[in-house]
Amino acid sequence: MAPPQGQMRPGRQLAVLGFIFVVLYLLVFFAGANGSVKDRLEPKLGLDLIGGTRVTLEATNSVDGKPPTAENLEEARQIIESRVNGLGVAEAEVVTEGNRNIVISLPGENRNLDEVGSAAELRFRKVLKAADGSGTIAAPPAATPTPSGSAVPTPSGGATPTPSGSGAPKATSSPSGGQGGMAPASPSATPTPSASPSAATPTPSASAEPVPASIEEQRKAVEQKVGAAAWQAANALQAPADLTADPSLGDKLKPFGTLSPQEVAVLPAQMQFNVPTIGCPTQLDKRPPASISDPKQQVVACEGGASKYLLDQAKVLGTDVDDADAVLDQTNSWVVSLDFSGEGQSKWTALTRESFNNEGQACDATALGQDGKCRVAVVLDNEIVSSPEIQGVLTGNSQITGNFNQKDASALAGQLRYGALPVTFEQQEAQNVTATLGASHLRAGLLAAGIGMLLVIIYSFFYYRLLGSVIFLSLILSALLVFGALVVLGRQIGFTLTLAGIAGMIVSLGVAADSFVIYFERLKDEIREGRSPRSAVPRAWIRARRTIISANAITLLSAVVLYVVSVGTVKGFAFALGLATVLDLVVVFLFRHPIMTMFARTRAFLSPRVSGLGRALPARNQPTQQPRNPRAKEA
C-alpha cells in the first residue's frame, strides 16, 4: 500500500479560496458600483422577476433559410436599438443571441414592441392594375379601389391644397410649373377589370427575372396541391378572371382559395393578381416578411383589405429617403414628411413625371385616379400605406398621408429615419410581466431555493452528522460565490437573473449533493479496508476526485449545449446551471478536501456517533481473522 504523495497543507488552499472571495467582493462593492450598500449588492434581475417586456426576434429568409451574416445581424441590432430609443424608452437592452436571434428587453415597463422588428422596407411602386381582393367568386370582380391617403409636396414648394367638387383634398401645380401635387383617386372613375382592353398589355418593366431554385420547388409543390387543371387555368389567365363570361372557371380556380399565405407568396405575381380566389384578408395580407421586397420584380399588394393591385418595379427605395418626420399638415392631420437625398430626389422626380404622363400607357384604366393620372403606391414591407394619384411632377420634398395618429406617424417616421433592416425577422417569443407578478415570482424562486438547500442540509446532518457541517459550510460558500458572480456579471456583461436561472441553481444543489455522497462513501470504503481516518482522507480524495470531475463535466457540457441551441429564458437556466457547477468545483477543491484533512486530525473524527462514519470505524477496529493454512507446519 503506497502512501499518499506529498503532505497535504490545507491552509494554502483555504488561503487561495479566501483570496478569491476578497477579490470577488471587492469587484462587487467597487467595480462599476454606485449608491448604497444595498444597491451595490443587488444583482441584475430579469423581466420575469421585476416586470417588463421581452421580445425575441428570429431572422428569417424566405428563399434559402440560411442564417444572416454577423455583420447584417449586428447592423439590424443597432437599427432596432435606435428605433426603441426613438420611442422614448429608457434602459432598453437590445442584444444578439446566437446567429439568428435579437432579444429586446425593457425592464420595469410593459409596452408593445412589435413594430420595432418590422423590416421597414419602403418602396414606391407605380400602380399598374387594380382588381377585387375579397377572394370570393360569387360575383364578377368589380374593383373599386379607395386609396387611404394622398401625398403632397411641402409648403415650401408652392403647392396649396384647394377643395374640389367632391370634397377631397387636391393639390394643383404652382404657377411657375416647378412643382405639382398628388390627390386621391375617385372611386367613381374606376371601371371594372373586364372593361379594360389593355389589361393584358405587358409593361416595359415587366421583364421576367430568374426564379431561385428553392422557390421553383415550392411552386411545384403548390401545383400538385391545387391540381393540374386549376394550375393550367390560372396560368392561362392574362387578366383578372371574368367569371360572368365563363362561370365554370370559378370552380376550377377554387383550390387556390385553400392555399396558405406562405404558399401564395411563392406564386408568380401575375397569378396572384389574376386568380380571383386569392384574396387579401386571409392570404395576401398575411404573407411572410420580405415576400415583396425585391425592387426589381413586379408584385401584388392590397390596400384596405378589399382591393389588390399589381405594382410595378420599385423605382424609389427607402434608402433614397434622407430624413423623415411626423408632422401636422395644414388640415391638422398627422403626416410623415419625407426629405429625399440628392440621388433619391432625382429618382422621385422621374417617377412622378412617368406617372403624371402615364408614359407608355403602363397604367391600366382600373388603376388611374379621378383625373386620369397614374397612382404611386407607398409600400412598407407587405402593406400599402397609401396610393395617391400623381397631380404633377414633384421636384421637392413630399409627404405620406393616411389615417395616422401621432403614435403611428412617429413610428413610421422612426422606421424610415433609421433605415430598413438588412434582415427580416419573425417574432418567436413575447413576454409582458407586471411588476407585482415579477415580485411574486422572485419570492417564489427564493423560497424554492431556500427549501431545497434546507432539505439537503437536514439530510446531511441526519446521515453524516459532523460531516454534515462540511456540507453546510460548502453550500454556504457556494451560494456566496454564486451571488457575488451574479452581481459582477450583471454589471460587466449584462447577465440577468431570471426565474429559469433560479431553477438552474436549484438543480445545481443536486449536483453538489452528489459530489458529497461520492467523497464520503469512498472515505467509508477506505476505512473499512483497514486504513486509519487520517490516511483514508487523501486516498478517498484521489479516487473520488475523478468521479466528481467527470460528473460535473457532464453537467457542465449539458449546460453548454443547452445554452448554444436554446432561445430565450432557457439560456438563463443553462447559464446559471453551468455557473453554479463551475463554482461548486472551486469549493470542492479549495474547501471541502482541505477541511476534511483538518477534521481527520481531530478526536471527534474517530467517534462513529460524532463523525457520521457509522459502522466503518467499528469494522476497522475488529481484529481480522487469519486464513487457515491447510498444510501442516513442519518442525
Image (spheres, rainbow, N blue to C red):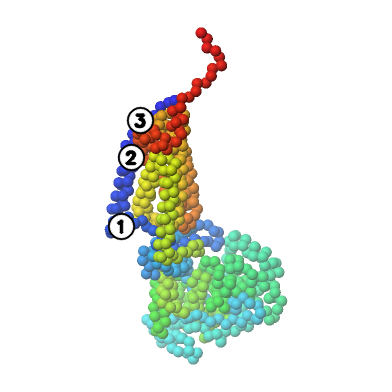
Q: Which residue is mark 1?
A: 38
Q: Is residue 276 above or below residue 635?
A: below
The answer for how far apart the CA atoms under marks 1 and 2 are is 28 Å
Crowding around mark 1 (Cα neighbors within 10 Å: few <14, some 14 to 19, many 20+) is: few
Which residue appears at 36% of the width and 38% of the height? 595
Give the secondary structure at mark 1: helix
Q: Which residue is mark 3?
A: 7
Q: Nearer the viewer, residue 189 or 16?
A: 16
Report the amino acid beneath label 1.
Answer: Lys
Crowding around mark 2 (Cα neighbors within 10 Å: few <14, some 14 to 19, many 20+) is: some
| Residue 312 visible within the image | yes
Quarter of the image with the N terminus is top left
Q: Is residue 518 above or below residue 242?
A: above
Q: Which residue is mark 2?
A: 14
Give the numbered dot on residue 438: none
Taking 69 as reference, is 23 left or right?
left
Q: Position of residue 539 (x, y in %)?
A: 42, 32
| Residue 336 visible within the image | no
The answer for how far apart the CA atoms under marks 2 and 3 are is 15 Å
Taking 290 as reference, is 256 left or right?
right
Residue at the far top in the pictured view: 635
